[in-house]
Amino acid sequence: MTDYELLDMIGEVNEDYVLAADSNVVRPRFRWKALAACAACAVLALGAYPVYQAVNPPLHDYTLMENSADSVDTVKEWDDLAKAPAGGAGPSADSDADEVPPVLAAPAAPETAEGRTDKGGEREDESAVTGSDGAKYWVGDAPAQEAALWYDALLHTYRLDENPEWYGGAWIAGDRLLAVAIVDGFRTPELEAEIQKAAGDGAVLQFSTVKYSMEFLDGLMEPATRALDGAGLTCGIGVDVMANCLGVDLYSDGAAIPDDVLAALAHLDPDGDAIRVRVFTGTISAYDAVKGPASADSKAIATPSPGGRQEAPDDPLETKEAEQSAHYDLLPGGE
Amino acid sequence: MDDNQIIELFFARDEGAIEAVQREYGGYCVSIARNILGDQGTAEECVNDGWLKCWQSIPPQRPRSLKSFAGRIVRNLALSALRADTAQKRGGGQAALALDELSEVASGGETPEGALDRAAFRAALDSFLDALPERNRNLFLRRYWYLDSVEALAKRYSMSRTQVTTTLHRLRQRLRVHLQQEGFDL
């Protein structure tokens, strides 16, 4: 038999088979197994992350300020600072006044319209003058006083102490300059004009846009305090209006900050920029414990990093001196 | 128009039967002829000859499946044309490749002579096909009845070319063993 003959004979096979072979087209099989395996992997991947997050919650960044609380010099400097006149001329009582920011330097102590002020987030008694820290921090020079009056006008027009939603904070930023922070999304020329009108036609205002409202940052206070409860830590919490964040200063004598505290703070601040955590190590002086060694945007908080980073201020005196103006900020909520 | 109506036209010697069968099965038959001859023009000529053959065969024959009947006629004509034209025998058509492959099975032994032997051989082929899984049976017939290319088979059955080639090789070996067991000297 030849190949031709075999091919001929194959042509005579059952026609049902021939017709069936013509109609039968096999579509690519749906790969259920592959699909199921992919789906299972996806479920595992998606499900594993929340589980991992639950087991290993993200921790809030913090900046480690090593030996910043136990230095005798530091304590002395802060004591000196406390004694400095007019907003704190610096840690040394005999510092050269020319080197002191003008807003802090003037020793006058005029009264404000309302007789209230805030310093470092602490409201003074009713008899105190605006921007002063009792008899220690006088901001009685005319420019500062004028800015305080502008602030006061804003306070009453907008009831800033009730934290309108656009309000991100206000502080005296210079001799005759009141800084007003407006929450991103609310800043319009119309609102700026209104604020200008409320502060007075002569008011020199500097507007800025911030991410968080005072209302939001205020709202973080209570949960942040709860997060720190029971951790055995000495801490200071307050809204840093210039940094537009809630400042949490923790004082440690060397013990690690519990992860659950950092996790709770991270939970409150998923973006990592609403709460600024600093950890001060060493023995805490009574003054530091009450007032905190510094605030605002000191050099030491330059770049927080996960797990903490040691930052030593180049010049603690200069840093604190500059920061003092930030504390003299007339915060409405008595931060 | 279904097969019975077309066949009735053939029986009535109505030339419309040719148009009808061409309309219904023209593409099918041309594809068979093209697979064998490897050329569209020649294939169409072959198919036209096939319609004439159908006209001559029906009546008296009354095919159960007009499609199968016409396809078989065209296949035989195409193979005859290929055989007659020796220059094209091992040309570009799939028949040449299929013949090479089938030479593994048919190696110059005795050819079934006479109607009984041929019927027995057909029965042996049918039993071989009957024993195959449907997929392999279809693959075998697409290759050696329709003379589809390996590429076409791979696409049709969602297989790789290697899978098709390997499967066909095993089927040929199996056919050889089966026919020998049936007593045929290949």
Image (cartoon, rainbow, N blue to C red):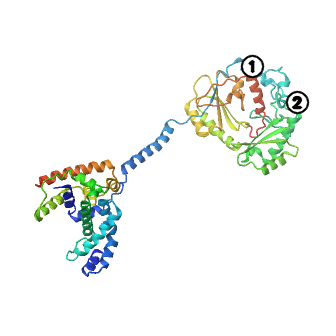
Q: Is residue A78 visible?
A: no
Secondary structure under the numbered disc 1 in the rendered image: helix
Front residue of A128 and B87: B87
| Residue plotted at (29% across, 77% down) | B6
Front residue of A160 and B60: B60
Q: On the picture, is B83 further left or further right than A172? A: left
Residue position marked by numbered label 2 in the rendering: A108
Residue B51 to residue A41: above or below: below
Residue B171 at x, y percent in the picture: 22, 52
Q: On the picture, is B5 further left or further right than A43? A: left
Residue position marked by numbered label 1 in the rendering: A76
Dots 2, 1 in contact, CB < 8 A: no
Residue A334 to residue B120: above or below: above
User: Rounded to the nearest whole Å, what is the CA distance between mark 2 and mark 1?
Assistant: 25 Å
Residue A267 at x, y percent in the picture: 58, 39
Quadrant of the frame with the C terminus of chain A: top right
User: Dot 2, how many residues are within 10 Å of its Cα: few (below 14), some (14-19), or many (20+)?
Assistant: some
Q: Amino acid at mark 2?
A: Ala
Front residue of B100 and A178: B100
The disc numbered 2 marks a residue on which chain?
Answer: A
| Residue plotted at (49% across, 36% down) | A55
Q: Quadrant of residue A133?
A: top right
Secondary structure under the numbered disc 2 in the rendered image: loop
User: Dot 1, how many residues are within 10 Å of its Cα: few (below 14), some (14-19), or many (20+)?
Assistant: some
Q: Quadrant of residue B21?
A: bottom left
Q: Is residue A110 visible?
A: yes
Q: Quadrant of residue A314?
A: top right
Residue A93 at x, y percent in the picture: 82, 21
- Mark before the other along the chain sequence, 2 or 1: 1
Q: On the picture, is A11 further left or further right than A115? A: left
Same chain for the residues under marks 2 and 1 in the image: yes
